[in-house]
Image (cartoon, helix red, strand yellow):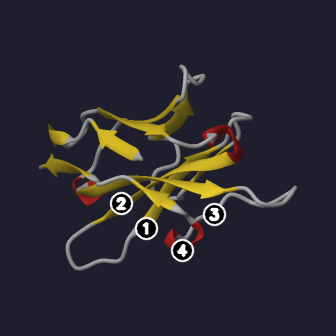
């Protein structure tokens, strides 16, 4: 199970932090990602990280968003999305997701179909 939290309303230029808590599997062998979906648009990749600390970002959020993860506490894994300098176009429902790593050298997925598990989404609204 994945549980995203931390969404809310913020003014443009502000910051917000999202978190995802995952349990039930060994998520250290997964890519931990964030996607977002705005009304009328397809779900899009935002950022992803792995237990190694490597990270990947969508061009639209590079330099503004930071993805990170905690060490596992018991069976709960957490990863985060720190969002700074928010823009109105960042508005949407943000989903955390986990992609199973099945091969050495497998690149981090940037499309929704690559991901195996999803959280319920948390709404981020950036006002002008």
Percent coordinates x, y for residue 54 in the rendering: 71, 40
Q: Is residue 20 left or right of residue 31?
A: left
Estimate how packed mark 3 is, as few (under 14), some (14 to 19) or many (20 or more) residues with alpha carbons within 10 Å: many
If you read the primary sequence from the N terminus, does the residue marked by circle 1 or circle 2 appear first?
2
Please tell me which residue lies in front, 70 or 41: 70
Whole-Å distance between the Cαs marked 1 and 3? 11 Å
Residue at coordinates 87% horizontally, 55% vertically from top-left?
104
Find disc 4 in the rendering and name its residue: 113
Foreground label between 4 and 2: 4
Please tell me which residue lies in front, 57 or 86: 57
- Outermost residue, right direction? 104
Residue at coordinates 69% horizontally, 35% vertically from top-left?
51
If you read the primary sequence from the N terminus, does the residue marked by circle 4 or circle 2 appear first?
2
Q: Secondary structure at mark 3?
A: loop
Q: Secondary structure at mark 2?
A: strand
Q: Secondary structure at mark 1?
A: strand
Q: Secondary structure at mark 4?
A: helix
Mark 1 and mark 2 residues within 8 Å of each other at the beta carbon: yes
Foreground label between 4 and 1: 4
Estimate how packed mark 4 is, as few (under 14), some (14 to 19) or many (20 or more) residues with alpha carbons within 10 Å: few
Find disc 2 in the rendering and name its residue: 36
Whole-Å distance between the Cαs marked 3 and 4? 9 Å
Find disc 3 in the rendering and name its residue: 109
Percent coordinates x, y for residue 49 in the rendering: 62, 43
Q: Which numbered circle lies on residue 44? A: 1
């Amino acid at each position: 199970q994945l549980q995203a939290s931390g969404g809310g309303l913020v003014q443009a230029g502000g910051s917000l932090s999202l978190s995802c808590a995952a349990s039930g599997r060994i998520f250290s062998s997964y890519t931990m990602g964030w996607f977002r979906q705005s009304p009328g648009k397809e779900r899009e990749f935002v950022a992803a990280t792995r237990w190694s600390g490597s990270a990947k970002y969508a061009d639209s959020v590079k330099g503004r968003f930071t993805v990170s993860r905690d060490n596992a506490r018991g069976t709960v894994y957490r990863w985060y999305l720190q969002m700074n300098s928010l823009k109105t176009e960042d508005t949407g429902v943000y989903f955390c997701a986990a992609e199973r790593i099945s091969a050495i050298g497998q690149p981090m997925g940037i499309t929704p179909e690559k991901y195996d598990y999803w959280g319920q989404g948390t709404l981020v609204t950036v006002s002008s």
